[in-house]
Amino acid sequence: MRKMVFEILGIVMVLASVVFFFYSVQFLSERDYIAAILQIFVGFAMVRSGIELTRMALLSDRDS
């Protein structure tokens, strides 16, 4: 059960980061560079968190 929750949350976070990257491109097209940079940082943080959650899913699968 824990493995499935970690996998789902990890995939959702990686997909949500794609949305943040999309909005950062929109901010760049509007020449709002500060907002775009902040969105990019949030996107990278979400990708990293999603990868860590999927890694936890793999490790919890190995332990059981």
Image (cartoon, rainbow, N blue to C red):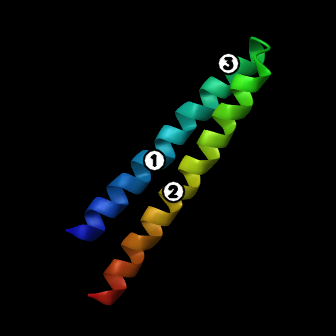
Which image quarter holds the C terminus?
Answer: bottom left
Q: Which residue is mark 3?
A: 26
Instruction: Please say if the residues under marks 3 and 2 sit with CB atoms less than 8 Å apart.
Output: no
Mark 3 closeness class: few <14, some 14–19, many ≥20 residues within 10 Å = some
Q: Which mark is residue 13?
A: 1
Taking depth in this image into account, of 37 and 24 the one nearest to the observer is: 37
Instruction: Please say if the residues under marks 3 and 1 sit with CB atoms less than 8 Å apart.
Output: no
Residue 18 rendering spot, x and y as whole percentages = 56, 37
**Mark whose residue sits in front, 3 or 2:** 2
Mark 1 closeness class: few <14, some 14–19, many ≥20 residues within 10 Å = many
**Could you tell me which secondary element the residue under label 3 belongs to?**
helix
Instruction: Please say if the residues under marks 2 and 1 sit with CB atoms less than 8 Å apart.
Output: yes
**Left or right for 57, reference 31:** left
| Disc on the earlier residue, 3 or 2 | 3
Residue 42 rendering spot, x and y as whole percentages = 60, 40
Name the amino acid type tagged 3. Answer: Gln
Number of marks in picture: 3
**Could you tell me which secondary element the residue under label 2 belongs to?**
helix
Mark 2 closeness class: few <14, some 14–19, many ≥20 residues within 10 Å = some
Return the residue found at the far left. 1
- Dividing the picture into quadrants, the one containing residue 63 is bottom left
Residue 61 rendering spot, x and y as whole percentages = 32, 80
Calculate the distance from the C-alpha at mark 3 to the C-alpha at mark 1: 20 Å
Return the residue found at the far bottom. 63
